[in-house]
Image (tube, coloured by chain):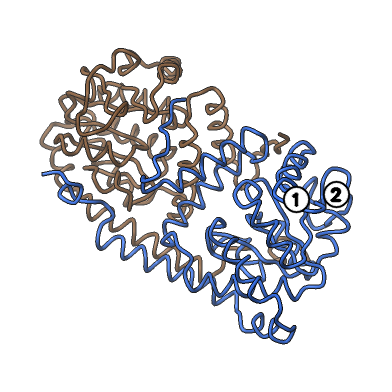
Chain colours: A brown, B blue
Amino acid sequence: MNETTIKTKHPRAESLSIRKRLIQHYKSGIVADAGLFAHGRGEAFDYLLGEKTGDNALKAIKAAAAMLLNAEHPVISVNGNAAALVGKDIVELAQVTKSKIEVNLFYRSTKREIAIETLLSEAGAGKVLGVGKAASGRIHEIGSERRRVDPEGILVADVVMVPLEDGDRTEALAKMKKNVIAVDLNPLSRTAQFATVTIVDNIVRAMPALVRIAQKLKNEDRSRLQAIIADFSNKESLSEAIRLINRRLSQLAEKGTYLTPSQKGWT
Amino acid sequence: MNETTIKTKHPRAESLSIRKRLIQHYKSGIVADAGLFAHGRGEAFDYLLGEKTGDNALKAIKAAAAMLLNAEHPVISVNGNAAALVGKDIVELAQVTKSKIEVNLFYRSTKREIAIETLLSEAGAGKVLGVGKAASGRIHEIGSERRRVDPEGILVADVVMVPLEDGDRTEALAKMKKNVIAVDLNPLSRTAQFATVTIVDNIVRAMPALVRIAQKLKNEDRSRLQAIIADFSNKESLSEAIRLINRRLSQLAEKGTYLTPSQKGWT
């Protein structure tokens, strides 16, 4: 179809560029149907959050960085959208925090797993867990194919980062007493509420910020990292995110969100 | 890819079924890439609105029905998502209100226009405007291909219904002094704010309701219809929609949106 070329000065240039990338990865089999709809949902919440990483999100990002650095067996779980949007940042984060990377898809297929593994390898990843037969472990709280995990990865992890994850699986990991770090633009989702640390932010902003902050904290001693973790309350962070949305809704309603003809340069 | 079959008892059965339909129409060329993301955004707002057609939306639907019935040259504009989601309802609405139907795509291609025309014809539509060379009229406030309209349809319409429309085009139609009826789950969008009547509701609920209410009102005299129209304020309706979202956000935040293990039947 004949879609417009993306002019770099277009106010929505970045958003359109991200969509373009997702569609490319959808066509190449990396992103699932559900991933496109999920991205749209994220766009709506990001709009309501003001499309920037505020202090509230930064606090959560800092706690997440400390949690990964303090962990014994940290694992970063990767699905299609995460690989497509922030594959390179995931690889960097894994290196800085000495985390393992595991491919863990809601809609499994060996073909998709291999495609994602390839994408990550090309971005510099070392060993990628969870591909094909390697996902021989089982999380029994979850049904069917979604229970499959790598016995070297998520199954034995003490901290699992799940960017863009499903509520059922976040809940199951939490029930297994694992510390779960989620990135979710919807502070009301089950994922957001079951995670130990929820970063309510757009993953394309949050992941680079997380890499940067992890770099800063990586030589801190354990007691300092644990203090950062103890200082963070997910409940409060989520409540604050909801308050932010409420405030922004009211602001947008008051001033109106459209440009008047004169602002657009018309008479 | 191996997606789950949709069990009819699944709480998200309808939502999954709608997504499945959209993907099918995406693959057949009727729905554009942007349409999938837009649907996801709609899902987020619908979730925030409580996923039901409340009194506020019903008031707007009633005003819309009256406006179409009272019009001299009413036209219903159809894009890929509208055709895929509510093609049949659009045809019924056109019949009840004696409106014309015009295919009007953001991303034009004769192939897509014909596919949509076919879908509408199979749903019982009579003549469908705006296909191929028939879209020879121009709305000069809009750039490039998006300015093309049918000289027998939107160009000369006094009332245009634009389910799922773009802000630029809604604004252009409003500037041409046409009455615009929009369906938009985001009460803050430019479309919502430039339309004369905005139905803040999910199109799959709003369109059948609109057909039903138009059936009830179709024999009313003009003065009655005009009274219904005069009684409606889009500004107030949109403000109420935003209040509804804020209230629901607070409710959801208070009680939590997840089921506790005991509620799910676990020990």
The amino acid sitting under disc 1 is Asn
**The N terminus of chain A is located in which quarter?**
top right
Q: Residues within 10 Å of mark 2 (few under 14, many from 20)?
A: many
**The C terminus of chain A is located in which quarter?**
bottom right
Foreground residue, B151 or B22?
B22
Q: Which residue is mark 1?
A: B104
The image quarter containing residue A13 is top right
Above/below status of B58 relative to B155: below
What residue appears at the point 14 percent right and 45 percent down from the top-left corner?
A230
Q: Position of residue A33 (x, y in %)?
A: 50, 34
**Tag 2, which secondary structure?**
loop
Q: Which residue is mark 2?
A: B135
What residue appears at the point 62 percent right and 52 percent down from the top-left corner?
B86
The image quarter containing residue A23 is top right
Q: Position of residue B240 (x, y in %)?
A: 48, 73
The amino acid sitting under disc 2 is Ala
For marks 1 and 2, the one nearer the N-term is: 1
What residue appears at the point 83 percent right and 57 percent down from the top-left corner?
B139
Q: Is residue B214 left or right of residue B174?
A: left
What residue appears at the point 13 percent right and 38 percent down from the top-left corner?
A226
The image quarter containing residue B6 is top left
Proximity of marks 1 and 2: CB atoms separated by less than 8 Å: yes
